[in-house]
Amino acid sequence: MYVVILAGGSGTRFWPVSRAARPKQLISVTDGPTMLQRTVERILPLKPKRVLVITNRLQAAETERQLAGYRASVPVDVIAEPVGRNTAPAVGLAATIIAAHDPEGVMAVLPADHYIRDDEGLRQSLQLAANSARNGWLMTLGIVPTSPETGYGYLEADMSLRGLGPFPVTRFVEKPDRATALAYLEAGTYFWNSGMFVWRADTILTEIARYMPELAAQLERMTFGDVWDLADLSGQIADIYAAIGGQSIDYGVMEQSERVQMVPADVGWSDVGSWSALPEVTDLDAQGTVVANCSTYVNVESSGCIVSGNGHVVATVGVHDLIVVATGDAVLVCPKDRAQDVKKVVEQLAAQGLENYL
């Protein structure tokens, strides 16, 4: 198996810790390794042939730095996109590179910024998906929903077949309202769309050619030598990205293809979309507070907070359900239920010309 890790991002939702050059996947939102590093460590027991990390030019140097220590265990290639074009071009680019050397090679596509509680469960799901992918199916991992979540897209699966799957995907559904999400949860045939895929390189390229012919035509221009060497591809990639538009692989291929199947994955998954998601992915103290990256946290009659200190001493007195984030040059304080509005801070800083804080 080849592993393709999608590692772009703008670095807005976890400001002030995340910045344009260090978005969510390149930071540790709790303690320990960054989310990108955790993603690599998670798949190492699968003994992948290679790991391809697709990022952008602004984040490439830090990505290289964070992955350097893993090259003793697995070959790692960092590919810098010249400009963001969503997931379909990134997937197509990785598939084209793999197919040039191993057309029937199975590739798992994983976002770099997701949290997985059950690493072994994920590996088992990926291996089950790979078995079907070898037979020409486009496989996706559907997360078993635990709540009527309105922030995720959903998959509907044909569950009439017995067993653990895979199951045919009958449709993709956009983010629903709460009543609809509750109906999905009760139906038992809907799953959260994880954005994790497994397929053969030649299979996904065939489907891209069918449903996204303009992208396929550009990818088919690429030329390769006999040896796996990506050092000279930057010029070709720049030409291709200048000639194409952006599109997600979900919308461009998966929602149209008749070859889509799903493996249910109950692995403690979260896309960790904002500071308020941290209670889903880390332990709480006795007062229900998340404490991350603080040298010392002093709690005086406070509860339900999210505190990130960047190595500083942080104290809270008589406050509840707040997000408090301190870095070397900025401090964020907001109610937990306003976490999605952190992006408005980023917008205002940009409007005021304060890019050095971004």
Image: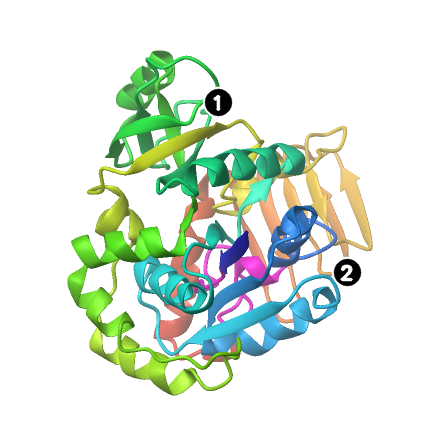
Q: Secondary structure at mark 1?
A: loop
Percent coordinates x, y for residue 57 in the rendering = 46, 78
Query: In this view, which residue lies farthest toward the right?
Result: 296
Residue visible at 52% across and 33% down? Answer: 128
Task: Using the image, tell me which numbered label, if any, was put on residue 350.
Answer: none
Percent coordinates x, y for residue 40 in the rendering = 63, 55
Q: Quadrant of residue 313?
A: bottom right
Q: Residue 15 colored magenta? A: yes
CB-based contact (under 8 Å), mark 1 and mark 2: no
Q: CA distance from mark 1 to mark 2?
A: 34 Å
Q: Nearer the viewer, residue 52 or 26?
A: 52
> Which secondary structure dominates the residues rendered in magenta?
loop
Q: Nearer the viewer, residue 29 or 222?
A: 222
Residue visible at 48% across and 37% down? Answer: 131
* Residue assigned mark 1: 146
Q: Residue 300 colored magenta? A: no
Amino acid at circle 1: Thr
Q: Is residue 165 left or right of residue 3?
A: left
In the rendered structure, which disc, 1 or 2, sits on the residue that comes first in sequence? Answer: 1
Q: Which residues are magenta?
A: 6-27
Name above or below for residue 337 compared with residue 346: above
Residue visible at 64% across and 35% down? Answer: 117
Name above or below for residue 338 compared with residue 237: above
Q: Quadrant of residue 216?
A: bottom left
Task: Using the image, tell me which numbered label, if any, was put on residue 311.
Answer: 2
Decide if residue 182 is in sight here.
Answer: yes
